[in-house]
Amino acid sequence: MAKKSPLYTKLGDKGETSLVSGSRVLKSDLRICLYGEIDELNSWVGLVCSEIGEQYKSHKEFLQKIQGWLFDLGSNFACEFGKRKDYKLPQLDDQIILKIESEINDLDEKLPKLKNFVLPGGNRTSSFFHVCRTVSRRVERTLIKYSKSVNEVLPEYSMEFLNRLSDYFFVLGRFFNVDAGIGEVLWEPKTK
């Protein structure tokens, strides 16, 4: 039996980490923060997947596809633009965006028309989807900050992907409340 490699390398003990190419960067580098936030979003999606019952198998399967696409996106940020093709990193494409839009449209058809903002919450699953939505928005903000601070081409469709994901999570949050018969709490501005 082959000896297992240790889970710890000690290479990051001084505050640096390696990119796919082997280049060393600080763990506080905006690139590392960005793909760390993508990983965080992926973990939240994994958590909400663990909440979904068998009657929602198709939703769970699509969420697991999203997890794979998030991993694909993160791997691209873990590598310098000029070296991505050398490592044959998986890329997002327009078909992924269309699939997410189709899911959004299918879910939205089952929901009452919105006339007010919805307060995050409801049942546990719906609440987790609202967390996914807000983390997705944070990743999107970090992506924009990153794109403005470096002279590097962003992975194609990364902006569209993250933007659609937040919409998808919002609609899923609404769907899981409505499907459970839980009324949505609408935000109604109060005047003094």
Image (cartoon, rainbow, N blue to C red):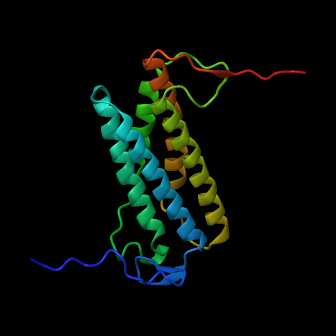
Res 143 quadrant in image: bottom right
Question: Is 64 displayed left or right of 185 in the figure?
Answer: left
Instruction: Name the spot of residue 147 as percent of width and height, x first.
Output: 62, 64
Please report the residue visible at 30 percent of the width from the left and 32 percent of the height from the top.
58
Res 47 quadrant in image: top left
Question: Is 180 displayed left or right of 50 in the figure?
Answer: right
Q: Is residue 56 visible?
A: yes
Instruction: Name the spot of residue 159 as percent of width and height, x first.
Output: 55, 52
Q: Is residue 157 visible?
A: no
Decide: is 112 above or below 38: above
Decide: is 10 above or below 87: below
Instruction: Name the spot of residue 40 as percent of width and height, x first.
Output: 49, 55
Question: Is 191 displayed left or right of 30 in the figure?
Answer: right
Camera-side residue of 79 and 122: 122
Instruction: Name the spot of residue 148 as percent of width and height, x first.
Output: 67, 65
Decide: is 4 above or below 42: below
Name the residue at the right extreme: 192
Res 70 quadrant in image: bottom left
Camera-side residue of 132 and 84: 132
Please report the residue visible at 61 percent of the width from the left and 20 percent of the height from the top.
114
